């Protein structure tokens, strides 16, 4: 991780505006590093790790409540799930896909009535995620749930997911010209995304493969993109991977991929060897959210980097607990 973030930091200094790029770095990668370094120390014990789980679940419930309130207001105004609300609800998908695995972790650890309540919240969060009409979030959720199911064989996750899909499908059939049906019909990777986003971004990376153009998406948006041409105009890179390649070149992109692979390998090894305790569930939740939000969704869309610091911090905190137990 330090190699990847260090290479991005160096790219700040060949940006056309060093101060602006440095501010962008501090607001994104700086936050990632801060969280990744402080969470393991602050939540190293099992008791404190449980508090962190509660905080993350409460935050997810808050996001759910806000989205439900917005849906209710849209329903009153006669614009519930209409196509012009797409950008309004897409903004919720980042948080929903991030908090969902921690809700699943609490549901797994809870007993009796609390477990039922938590699984209902998992189902609700999946429904709300479906109603965002974010295809990248849908793909990420499928991948993340697949990881969770493969490592736990929990039938309740399958039941919750299938039930949520059924509810979203029924709701979408009741409303003509809704955002869910409209965006699902376009498929996951539309031709337009290839033509006006990924292909121009890849071309720009190949034009300057070793150093990139300097840190900050604004560099591509303001200086590089206007020099490119394509039918219908050029979009942003629409991918976290391409964003890194544009900023600092192919070596930084390779460092990112290596970091992703190492993180996944360490957490999977830890989870597979242990029963579903608090630390195992936290590690599994971090892995699931990581796969959903960064490995998969970050490949097809640009997502916030800040959640990465929390996920890495959770993973490291759990691994440090294991080391402490050995000594």
Image (cartoon, rainbow, N blue to C red):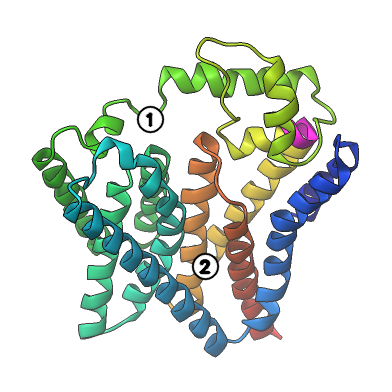
Mark 2 surroundings: few (<14), some (14-19) or many (≥20) residues within 10 A: many
Q: Is residue 247 magenta?
A: yes
Q: Position of residue 275 (x, y in %)?
A: 42, 74
Q: Nearer the viewer, residue 238 or 103?
A: 238
Magenta-drawn segment: 246-251
Question: Residue 188 got which mark?
Answer: 1
Q: Nearer the viewer, residue 322 or 109?
A: 109
The local secondary structure at tag 1 comes to: loop
**In the shown orientation, is residue 316 left or right of residue 85?**
right
Q: Which residue is mark 2?
A: 283
Q: Position of residue 241 (x, y in %)?
A: 63, 37
**In the shown orientation, is residue 17 left or right of residue 233?**
right
Q: Return the residue found at the far bottom.
A: 47
Q: Quadrant of the N terminus?
A: bottom right
Q: Nearer the viewer, mark 1 or mark 2?
A: 1
Main SS type for the magenta part? helix
Q: Is residue 88 visible?
A: yes
């Amino acid at each position: 991780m330090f190699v990847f973030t260090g290479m991005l930091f160096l790219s700040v200094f060949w940006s056309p505006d060093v101060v602006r790029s440095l501010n962008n770095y501090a607001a994104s990668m700086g936050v990632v590093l801060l969280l990744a370094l402080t969470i393991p120390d602050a939540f190293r014990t099992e008791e404190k790790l449980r508090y962190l789980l509660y905080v993350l679940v409460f935050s997810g419930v808050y996001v759910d409540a806000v989205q439900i309130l917005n849906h209710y207001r849209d329903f009153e105004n006669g614009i519930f799930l209409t196509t012009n609300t797409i950008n309004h609800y897409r903004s919720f998908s980042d948080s929903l896909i991030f908090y969902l695995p921690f809700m699943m972790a609490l549901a797994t650890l809870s007993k009796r009535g609390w477990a039922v309540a938590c699984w209902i919240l998992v189902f609700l969060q999946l429904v709300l995620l479906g109603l965002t009409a974010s295809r990248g979030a849908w793909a990420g959720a499928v991948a993340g749930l697949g990881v969770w199911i493969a490592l736990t064989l929990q039938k309740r996750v399958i039941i919750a997911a299938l039930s949520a899909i059924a509810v979203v499908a029924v709701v979408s059939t009741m409303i003509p010209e809704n955002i869910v049906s409209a965006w699902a019909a376009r498929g996951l990777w539309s031709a337009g995304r290839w033509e006006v986003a990924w292909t121009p971004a890849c071309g720009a990376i190949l034009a300057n493969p070793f150093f990139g153009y300097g840190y900050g998406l604004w560099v591509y948006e303001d200086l590089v993109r206007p020099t490119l041409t394509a039918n219908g105009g050029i979009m942003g890179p629409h991918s976290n991977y391409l964003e890194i390649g544009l900023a600092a070149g192919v070596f930084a992109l390779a460092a990112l991929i290596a970091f992703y692979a190492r993180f996944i390998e360490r957490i999977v090894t830890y989870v597979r060897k242990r029963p579903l305790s608090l630390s195992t569930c936290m590690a599994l939740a971090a892995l699931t959210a990581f796969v959903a939000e960064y490995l998969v969704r970050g490949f097809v869309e640009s997502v916030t980097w800040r959640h990465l610091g929390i996920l890495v911090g959770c993973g490291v905190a759990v691994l440090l607990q294991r080391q402490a137990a050995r000594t």
